[in-house]
Image: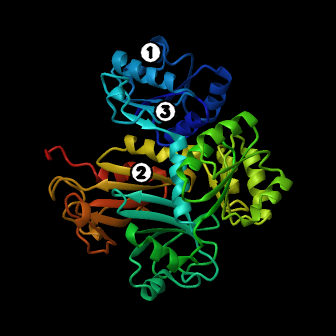
Amino acid sequence: MNIIILGAGRVGESVAESLVSEQNDITVIDHDPARLRLLEDRLDLRGVVGNGIQPSVLREAGAKDADMVIACAANDEANLVVCKVAHDIFNVPSTIARLRSPEFVEGDELLGKNGFAVDHVICPEESVTRYIHQLISYPEALQVLEFADGRASLIAMRAAYGGALVGHTIGEFRDRFPHAEMRVVALYRLDTEMEATKTTRILAGDEVFVLADTQKIRYVLGAIHNIDKPVQRVMITGGGKVGLRLARSLVGQCEVKIIERDKKRCEYLASQLPSSMLILSGDGADEDLLLEENVGQMDLFLALTNDDEDNIMSAMLAKRLGAGRVMALINRRAYADMMQGSTIDIAISPSQTVIGELLTHLRRGDVAAVHSLRRGAAEALEGIARGDVKTSKLVGRKVEELKLPKGARIGAIVRGEGRKSEVLMPHHDTVIETDDHIIMFIPNKRLVREVEKLFQVSATFFG
């Protein structure tokens, strides 16, 4: 696809990096020539210097032949105008805007074709908040992703000493817990993927990816990992957009303390949050302050400032001082890769949390959802089987008959709609039916195009 990205900031850079790796033709517009040069030196893309809301700049970037415009500039106004200009003047088929304001909701008339012509909205701050919420709900997990309107979930967790799975093969685990209907779709040991067969033995420290019926997640988690106590006490350092969003969402759910350096921001936070939430003016990496505020009694410590180094230092310090679980917001991909699974329990990458939302709009075939895994190296994809035996590569065929790319595997099938739907753990003789939601694990992004083709019906299908 020919894709234009407005903005070479952290989100725009991450989006460009992800999309370039999939052999898309990428052009990035930014007003900073130095920033564009760095991107051009590192990635196979073209940079255009200028203001993206100007038609002449969009024309130079190739808007006439573009398939999509992704507006990731720092302010909402620029992103809205770019989408409008791209649609009205250049007839760009698809537009995506990064919008921070909660007042712009996808599907609203204001964003329709007669308004700002924004087809899809992405908000990294909201994506990060949802991501953290899932981890608060399931404290044993490293990642929780939902498919088929929440009917099935993919859970990533680290096998812990004392857990029922450690020391046993996957096959033995199934025999010991026959009611834990799940499928181990991937296993990583020391960052290397291991073959996940029934004879594979799980060791402590292994990163396990499991697909299961969402209603049975608690049971599956308890079987694999010692159940952690619910998160009740939370300390947040950084009262910016993400910190405030998260605090608001935790009202009535957890005891929350927020540490913020800027005194004016502290006053604003106090005006926006209930008095039950304690707002502290100070440095999240101040050992005396953390001790004074009993960081060792916190179930969860979150470092959510705009500075990667500050987040890393404060999270590591909180862990050393006894905080139960620590997470750090880390924008630089290299830092996030280094910190994940270290003293810091979870490194949160804002760009990676939103990449999946973008990929869903880029995928060909009848793809319903895409989630980025392993910091963008792998994907979990939900596709819908359409057509019939004649027009589909999936419908009417047994799982063992499917021509899947090497390494790609089916983890679960969701069949039926609403309350009547069921989550199936497919076997070699399971037959794919029309409208089945098929959830697949793809260990390497280079295999994505082949998987997409499986969900494309032939030209004779008119359903």
CA neighbours of label 1 inside 10 A, class few (<14), some (14 to 19), many (20+): some
Q: Is residue 118 visible?
A: yes
**Residue type at numbered disc 2:** Val
Please provide percent x and percent y for residue 60: 48, 15
Q: Secondary structure at mark 3?
A: loop
The residues bearing labels 1 and 2 have C-alpha atoms spaced at a distance of: 31 Å
* Residue ID for mark 1: 59
Please provide percent x and percent y for residue 134: 51, 59
First along the sequence among labels 2 and 3: 3
Quarter of the image with the N terminus in it: top left
Please provide percent x and percent y for residue 83: 41, 24
Residues at marks 1 and 2 touching, judged by CB atoms closer than 8 Å: no
Residues at marks 1 and 3 touching, judged by CB atoms closer than 8 Å: no
**Residue type at numbered disc 3:** Leu
**Residue type at numbered disc 1:** Arg
First along the sequence among labels 1 and 2: 1
The residues bearing labels 2 and 3 have C-alpha atoms spaced at a distance of: 20 Å
What residue is at 40 percent from the left and 18 percent from the top? 85
CA neighbours of label 3 inside 10 A, class few (<14), some (14 to 19), many (20+): many
Any mark on residue 99, and which? 3
What residue is at 70 percent from the left and 63 percent from the top? 298
Please provide percent x and percent y for residue 190: 65, 67
First along the sequence among labels 1 and 3: 1
Q: Is label 2 or label 3 in front?
A: 3
* Residue ID for mark 2: 370
Q: Secondary structure at mark 2?
A: strand
